[in-house]
Image: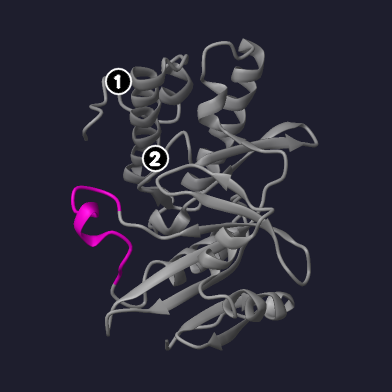
Amino acid sequence: MGAVVPTGYVLVTVGRCTAVARVELEDDARALLAEGTLYEAAARDLAARPLPGRGVAYAIALPVTGARVVVRHNRHGGLLAPLTKDVFLPPTRAPHELDASLRLAAMGVRTPTVSMYGVERVYGILRRADVMTLEVMGSRDLATYLLPGEVPAVRAEAWRATRALVRSLNAAGARHHDLNVKNVLLADGEGGLVAWVLDVDRVRFGDAHAASVRVGNATRLLQSARKWRTERGAVFDEREVAELGAPHGASPYS
Protein backbone atom coordinates (compact mmCIF):
# COMPACT_ATOMS: atom_id res chain seq x y z
CA MET A 1 0.00 0.00 0.00
CA GLY A 2 2.99 2.31 0.47
CA ALA A 3 1.37 3.85 3.53
CA VAL A 4 3.21 6.34 5.70
CA VAL A 5 3.01 4.91 9.21
CA PRO A 6 3.06 7.57 11.96
CA THR A 7 4.95 7.06 15.20
CA GLY A 8 2.93 4.84 17.52
CA TYR A 9 1.27 2.95 14.65
CA VAL A 10 2.14 -0.29 12.86
CA LEU A 11 1.41 -1.72 9.42
CA VAL A 12 -0.53 -5.01 9.32
CA THR A 13 -1.26 -6.95 6.11
CA VAL A 14 -3.56 -9.95 5.81
CA GLY A 15 -4.47 -11.16 2.32
CA ARG A 16 -5.72 -8.30 0.13
CA CYS A 17 -6.25 -5.99 3.12
CA THR A 18 -3.79 -3.72 4.88
CA ALA A 19 -4.32 -1.81 8.10
CA VAL A 20 -2.43 0.95 9.87
CA ALA A 21 -3.15 0.44 13.58
CA ARG A 22 -1.99 1.78 16.89
CA VAL A 23 0.84 -0.41 18.16
CA GLU A 24 -1.17 -1.68 21.13
CA LEU A 25 -3.98 -2.76 18.77
CA GLU A 26 -1.85 -4.84 16.37
CA ASP A 27 -3.36 -8.14 17.54
CA ASP A 28 -6.85 -6.68 17.20
CA ALA A 29 -6.06 -5.64 13.63
CA ARG A 30 -4.86 -9.13 12.72
CA ALA A 31 -7.93 -10.73 14.28
CA LEU A 32 -10.31 -8.42 12.41
CA LEU A 33 -8.56 -8.72 9.04
CA ALA A 34 -8.69 -12.51 9.34
CA GLU A 35 -12.46 -12.08 8.80
CA GLY A 36 -12.12 -9.79 5.75
CA THR A 37 -12.13 -6.00 6.01
CA LEU A 38 -12.43 -4.03 9.25
CA TYR A 39 -16.00 -3.07 8.31
CA GLU A 40 -16.99 -6.63 7.40
CA ALA A 41 -15.68 -7.89 10.72
CA ALA A 42 -17.58 -5.19 12.61
CA ALA A 43 -20.81 -5.92 10.71
CA ARG A 44 -20.53 -9.62 11.64
CA ASP A 45 -20.13 -8.87 15.35
CA LEU A 46 -23.36 -10.02 16.99
CA ALA A 47 -22.88 -7.45 19.76
CA ALA A 48 -22.27 -4.55 17.34
CA ARG A 49 -24.43 -1.44 17.80
CA PRO A 50 -25.43 0.08 14.44
CA LEU A 51 -25.10 3.85 14.13
CA PRO A 52 -27.11 5.28 11.22
CA GLY A 53 -25.68 7.97 8.97
CA ARG A 54 -24.71 8.28 5.30
CA GLY A 55 -23.95 4.58 5.74
CA VAL A 56 -24.31 2.46 8.85
CA ALA A 57 -21.29 2.54 11.19
CA TYR A 58 -20.81 -0.02 13.94
CA ALA A 59 -19.80 0.46 17.58
CA ILE A 60 -17.99 -2.65 18.78
CA ALA A 61 -15.58 -3.95 21.39
CA LEU A 62 -12.28 -5.03 19.85
CA PRO A 63 -11.72 -8.81 20.00
CA VAL A 64 -8.38 -8.80 21.85
CA THR A 65 -8.08 -5.62 23.93
CA GLY A 66 -11.80 -4.99 24.35
CA ALA A 67 -11.39 -1.29 23.50
CA ARG A 68 -14.65 0.37 22.44
CA VAL A 69 -14.46 1.71 18.88
CA VAL A 70 -16.62 2.85 15.97
CA VAL A 71 -15.95 1.39 12.51
CA ARG A 72 -17.04 3.40 9.47
CA HIS A 73 -16.85 2.48 5.77
CA ASN A 74 -15.70 5.34 3.55
CA ARG A 75 -18.21 6.37 0.91
CA HIS A 76 -18.34 9.21 -1.57
CA GLY A 77 -20.88 12.00 -1.15
CA GLY A 78 -22.24 14.50 -3.62
CA LEU A 79 -23.80 14.19 -7.03
CA LEU A 80 -21.45 11.48 -8.27
CA ALA A 81 -21.95 9.23 -5.23
CA PRO A 82 -24.31 6.82 -7.09
CA LEU A 83 -21.50 6.19 -9.57
CA THR A 84 -18.37 6.32 -7.43
CA LYS A 85 -20.02 4.67 -4.39
CA ASP A 86 -17.23 3.39 -2.10
CA VAL A 87 -14.24 3.00 -4.42
CA PHE A 88 -11.29 5.40 -4.35
CA LEU A 89 -7.99 5.89 -6.06
CA PRO A 90 -5.09 5.12 -3.73
CA PRO A 91 -4.23 6.11 -1.10
CA THR A 92 -7.96 6.84 -0.32
CA ARG A 93 -9.03 9.45 2.24
CA ALA A 94 -8.13 7.27 5.23
CA PRO A 95 -4.44 8.26 5.60
CA HIS A 96 -5.42 11.94 5.49
CA GLU A 97 -8.01 11.35 8.19
CA LEU A 98 -5.38 9.80 10.45
CA ASP A 99 -2.93 12.63 9.77
CA ALA A 100 -5.60 15.29 10.30
CA SER A 101 -6.75 13.70 13.57
CA LEU A 102 -3.20 13.68 14.92
CA ARG A 103 -2.61 17.30 13.90
CA LEU A 104 -5.90 18.45 15.40
CA ALA A 105 -5.29 16.63 18.67
CA ALA A 106 -1.80 18.16 18.90
CA MET A 107 -3.39 21.61 18.54
CA GLY A 108 -6.02 21.03 21.20
CA VAL A 109 -9.00 20.19 19.00
CA ARG A 110 -11.13 17.36 20.38
CA THR A 111 -11.61 14.59 17.82
CA PRO A 112 -11.85 10.85 18.49
CA THR A 113 -8.51 9.06 18.13
CA VAL A 114 -8.15 7.12 14.88
CA SER A 115 -7.34 3.67 16.25
CA MET A 116 -6.71 2.16 12.83
CA TYR A 117 -7.73 2.30 9.22
CA GLY A 118 -7.89 -0.45 6.65
CA VAL A 119 -7.55 -0.47 2.86
CA GLU A 120 -8.73 -3.26 0.56
CA ARG A 121 -7.46 -3.74 -3.01
CA VAL A 122 -10.33 -3.98 -5.51
CA TYR A 123 -10.62 -3.74 -9.29
CA GLY A 124 -6.89 -3.51 -9.88
CA ILE A 125 -5.77 -0.02 -8.92
CA LEU A 126 -8.93 0.95 -6.99
CA ARG A 127 -9.34 0.70 -3.22
CA ARG A 128 -12.00 0.57 -0.52
CA ALA A 129 -11.28 1.93 2.96
CA ASP A 130 -12.57 1.71 6.52
CA VAL A 131 -11.72 3.97 9.45
CA MET A 132 -11.92 3.02 13.13
CA THR A 133 -12.04 5.62 15.91
CA LEU A 134 -12.29 5.35 19.67
CA GLU A 135 -15.91 5.57 20.80
CA VAL A 136 -16.83 8.72 22.73
CA MET A 137 -18.82 7.06 25.46
CA GLY A 138 -22.16 8.54 26.49
CA SER A 139 -22.19 10.96 23.58
CA ARG A 140 -24.89 12.13 21.20
CA ASP A 141 -24.69 14.45 18.23
CA LEU A 142 -25.65 18.11 18.12
CA ALA A 143 -28.65 17.33 15.90
CA THR A 144 -30.41 15.53 18.76
CA TYR A 145 -30.10 18.63 20.97
CA LEU A 146 -31.94 20.68 18.34
CA LEU A 147 -35.03 18.50 18.18
CA PRO A 148 -38.29 19.85 19.64
CA GLY A 149 -38.73 18.85 23.27
CA GLU A 150 -35.11 19.34 24.33
CA VAL A 151 -34.74 21.39 27.52
CA PRO A 152 -33.74 24.93 26.40
CA ALA A 153 -30.96 25.18 28.99
CA VAL A 154 -29.48 21.88 27.80
CA ARG A 155 -29.71 23.01 24.17
CA ALA A 156 -27.93 26.25 25.08
CA GLU A 157 -25.18 24.26 26.82
CA ALA A 158 -24.76 22.13 23.69
CA TRP A 159 -24.32 25.28 21.59
CA ARG A 160 -21.82 26.71 24.09
CA ALA A 161 -19.70 23.57 23.78
CA THR A 162 -20.08 23.58 19.98
CA ARG A 163 -18.90 27.19 19.74
CA ALA A 164 -15.84 26.32 21.81
CA LEU A 165 -15.09 23.44 19.43
CA VAL A 166 -15.45 25.61 16.32
CA ARG A 167 -13.19 28.27 17.84
CA SER A 168 -10.54 25.61 18.44
CA LEU A 169 -10.82 24.54 14.78
CA ASN A 170 -10.43 28.15 13.70
CA ALA A 171 -7.38 28.64 15.94
CA ALA A 172 -5.81 25.54 14.33
CA GLY A 173 -6.46 26.95 10.84
CA ALA A 174 -8.64 23.91 10.18
CA ARG A 175 -11.44 24.37 7.65
CA HIS A 176 -13.93 21.49 7.94
CA HIS A 177 -15.75 21.27 4.62
CA ASP A 178 -18.49 19.03 6.05
CA LEU A 179 -19.01 20.60 9.46
CA ASN A 180 -22.61 19.71 10.24
CA VAL A 181 -24.90 18.99 13.17
CA LYS A 182 -24.30 15.23 12.81
CA ASN A 183 -20.51 15.62 12.85
CA VAL A 184 -20.40 17.29 16.27
CA LEU A 185 -20.60 14.91 19.24
CA LEU A 186 -21.29 16.11 22.77
CA ALA A 187 -20.46 14.30 25.99
CA ASP A 188 -20.19 15.19 29.65
CA GLY A 189 -16.92 16.75 30.76
CA GLU A 190 -15.61 18.20 34.00
CA GLY A 191 -17.20 21.62 33.44
CA GLY A 192 -20.30 20.52 31.53
CA LEU A 193 -20.73 19.33 27.97
CA VAL A 194 -17.69 19.16 25.70
CA ALA A 195 -17.81 18.80 21.91
CA TRP A 196 -15.87 16.51 19.57
CA VAL A 197 -15.59 16.86 15.79
CA LEU A 198 -16.02 13.86 13.48
CA ASP A 199 -15.15 13.00 9.85
CA VAL A 200 -11.94 15.00 9.82
CA ASP A 201 -10.98 13.59 6.43
CA ARG A 202 -12.86 16.67 5.18
CA VAL A 203 -10.52 19.03 7.08
CA ARG A 204 -7.98 21.13 5.21
CA PHE A 205 -5.39 23.23 7.03
CA GLY A 206 -4.59 26.83 6.26
CA ASP A 207 -3.85 30.15 7.93
CA ALA A 208 -5.39 30.37 11.40
CA HIS A 209 -5.89 34.12 10.82
CA ALA A 210 -7.65 33.70 7.48
CA ALA A 211 -11.26 34.87 7.49
CA SER A 212 -12.08 32.06 5.04
CA VAL A 213 -11.51 29.46 7.77
CA ARG A 214 -13.67 31.20 10.37
CA VAL A 215 -16.46 32.16 7.95
CA GLY A 216 -16.32 28.80 6.15
CA ASN A 217 -16.73 26.75 9.32
CA ALA A 218 -19.54 28.91 10.70
CA THR A 219 -21.39 29.12 7.40
CA ARG A 220 -21.22 25.35 6.83
CA LEU A 221 -22.58 24.67 10.34
CA LEU A 222 -25.36 27.21 9.84
CA GLN A 223 -26.35 25.61 6.53
CA SER A 224 -26.61 22.24 8.24
CA ALA A 225 -28.68 23.56 11.14
CA ARG A 226 -31.07 25.26 8.71
CA LYS A 227 -31.45 22.05 6.72
CA TRP A 228 -32.16 20.13 9.94
CA ARG A 229 -34.78 22.74 10.83
CA THR A 230 -36.47 22.38 7.43
CA GLU A 231 -36.40 18.59 7.40
CA ARG A 232 -36.80 17.71 11.09
CA GLY A 233 -38.24 20.81 12.76
CA ALA A 234 -35.00 21.63 14.60
CA VAL A 235 -35.21 24.47 17.10
CA PHE A 236 -32.32 26.94 17.22
CA ASP A 237 -31.49 30.61 17.23
CA GLU A 238 -29.25 31.57 14.30
CA ARG A 239 -27.36 33.94 16.57
CA GLU A 240 -25.88 30.83 18.22
CA VAL A 241 -23.92 30.29 15.00
CA ALA A 242 -23.67 33.82 13.59
CA GLU A 243 -21.38 34.99 16.37
CA LEU A 244 -18.82 32.47 15.12
CA GLY A 245 -18.56 34.37 11.86
CA ALA A 246 -21.39 33.20 9.61
CA PRO A 247 -22.44 36.14 7.45
CA HIS A 248 -25.99 37.39 7.89
CA GLY A 249 -28.30 35.75 5.37
CA ALA A 250 -25.68 33.19 4.35
CA SER A 251 -27.01 31.12 1.47
CA PRO A 252 -27.65 27.44 2.25
CA TYR A 253 -26.02 26.69 -1.10
CA SER A 254 -22.82 28.73 -0.81
Q: Mark 2: which amino acid?
A: Asn
Residue 106 can be seen in this image? no
Residue 195 can be seen in this image? yes
Looking at the picture, how far across and down is residue 67, in whole percent? 75, 62
Indicate how the structure is coloured in the image.
Answer: one colour
Element type where label 2 sits in the image: helix
Foreground pick, 203 / 205:
203
In which quadrant is the N terminus drawn? Answer: bottom left
Q: Which residue is located at x 56 percent, y 78 percent? A: 20
In the depicted structure, whether residue 21 falls above or below residue 223: below
Q: Which residue is located at x 39 percent, y 24 percent? A: 228
In the depicted structure, whether residue 164 falls above or below residue 110: above
Instruction: Give the side of residue 183 with respect to residue 6, left or right.
Output: left
Foreground pick, 86 / 228:
86
Q: Mark 1: which amino acid?
A: His
Q: Which residue is located at x 64 percent, y 53 percent? A: 48
Could you say which disc has been placed on residue 248 in the image? Answer: 1
Q: CA distance from mark 2 to mark 1?
A: 14 Å
Looking at the picture, how far across and down is residue 194, in whole percent? 67, 37
Residue marked by disc 2: 217
Range of magenta residues: 77-88
